[in-house]
Amino acid sequence: MRAFHCVVLVSFLGSAGLGAESVEFGTPARPDFTGVRLQGTELFRGTDATRDIRLQPRSAHMANNLLYLDFDQELPHLLRDAAGRYQVLQANYIVSPEGRARRAALFSRLENRVEIASPEELWPGLLPLNDFTIEMSIRPIFFYRRNVIFQKTTLLDGEKRGLEIYIEGEHVIVSCWQLFEGSDGVRHTVQLRSHTSLKPNEWVQIRLSFEAARGRLALFLDGQESHVVRAGDSGGVWQAHFHPLDRSPMILAESYAGLLDEFRILGRASGEGGNTQYAAAQIDNDRLAGHQQSGVVLSEVMPGPDRFGAVHAHLAYEGEEPDASMLNVWVRTSNAPFSTDTRESELAWRRVPVAGMDLGDFRYLQWKAELKSDPGGNYSPILKSLRLTYESMRAPTTPRELRVVEGLTDPDQVGLEWVRSPEREIDEHGGYFVYIGLRSGEYAGRIQYVVRDGRAVPIRFEGLERLPLSTAEAMEQRLRPEVIRRLLDNRVRLVVTNELIQQNIALDPRRRLLPFLRAGEVLYFAVSAYNGRGGESELSEEVFARLRPR
């Protein structure tokens, strides 16, 4: 949940002979989002030092909040209930700029706490409890043996009664001390314990939900249900209520070391359609169709790193979609400049798959993200980071020292040799083209493949072990292998035969003819390297082979 502005980061990823750059948002290298326009979205501090983007929560008065503390005030004594119902009696904490949205409350001393008046006319009141939700975001710095985050308890008749949310053994525990009463008048304590443990210095959202009619208590961590209990027995659901003489305040972070943000109490159970922290879906029952407002993040139009010429790029993003929320990322590119607000009809958007997208070549790019909460309006998707990796189309190095190997050349074949180009990508994803022609500088076509074990493979460097050797070289290899290794190191060889030419004609979708080897003729050859992404080198120096009659 997050959103903002950010300066474009360019980091060199490096690759032999290939310029590669990335523009990053929300990554450790560039924690913020810069150069983006926010519409119904906001910046949000993630679980690490980066910023994320989420939907902007609805106002405190629109979200069924009974109580809402956002901790955005510049000084603790200015802390107020944004819902306008409760009085803050004491606010003793340090204002931290590291909140999930903006600021947060930092508790680091024993005297740090927040006390909120709990008059009988407000929740929890004197009557049996109706549905409610208590929600907050915390980032523990370290753990005491028992870390109380929220409590509304009192000691009556020597027994603790009320509600506590605390951390013990790095697990979140909810204790409802003598809070429930059965039909027989017996009081009961109910506890919940998170299945997963908390980690220091990581944000987590804690949510406790109570449905009175079902006696259902549910504990959520980061929107995921962690523990559920039913407050009841075979006799039915127990009633929940605080002691009528309990005038104790609600206390936040009485013994807790860490950050706390966005504390709220809602008058509905979590997951109900009316409990909409974000815009919920509006259903047209006549047409059985739904409409839901979304939030948008829109980038500026970004030029590619054109100092390398044409570019390809890969766009990838990381996000979360809790519950039934939805996150979609879109991109559009052009070779001509366009404005940020160019209409869809003029330049269409393409949706980026979760696995990312190769964008092809372009000169200008713009991306946007669309965020929708779940239909109930309880959860926001999160855009955590986005990375645009440019790959330059700079041509590979031209192969050098092309020559005809006389010991591998006769009327039926021509042996060619050249020094491999240094780019690793040529060996891994590209290869070499061997151009062939009957006149100098005029090539009828090219040989691109060799066929091994019935399979066509690109012409590539394969090492000395698979290099064709002449009779004299084979003898030298047996006697003095180190000499051959030194002479042929980093060399590529290809033996051109009529069979190889015919195979390449067959593999060409256009079936373009190539000249065949004929005794008494001369053939011309040149070689180029390609990198598998459309980049091809200049042609090497030309050589010719005399096909002498036997």
Image (tube, rainbow, N blue to C red):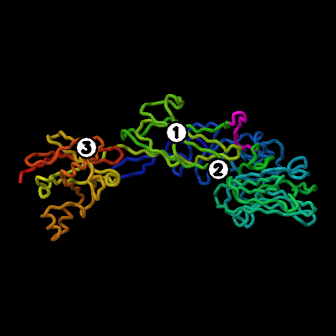
- Image position, residue 18 (x, y; %): 36, 48
Label 2–label 1 contact, CB within 8 A: no
Q: Residue 538 carries which label?
A: 3
Amino acid beneath label 3: Glu
Label 1–label 3 contact, CB within 8 A: no
Determine the image quadrant of residue 468. Answer: bottom left
Is residue 147 visible in the rendered structure shown here? no
Residue underneath mark 1:
367
Mark 1 to mark 3 CA distance (whole Å):
35 Å
- Give the magenta-colored segment's residue range: 275-288
Q: Work out whether 110 lies above or below 510.
A: below
- Image position, residue 539 (x, y; %): 23, 44
Crowd tier of the residue under label 3, counting other residues whose Cα lies within 10 Å: few below 14, some 14–19, many 20 or above: some
Q: Quick one: SS at disc 1?
A: strand
Q: Quick one: SS at disc 3?
A: loop
Label 2–label 3 contact, CB within 8 A: no
| Front-lying residue, 267 or 456 | 456
Mark 2 to mark 1 CA distance (whole Å):
23 Å
Q: Which mark is residue 322?
A: 2
67 within the magenta span: no
- Image position, residue 469 (x, y; %): 17, 61
Q: Which residue is drawn at 76% across and 39% down?
A: 62
Q: Which residue is drawn at 14% across and 48% down?
A: 517
Amino acid beneath label 2: Pro
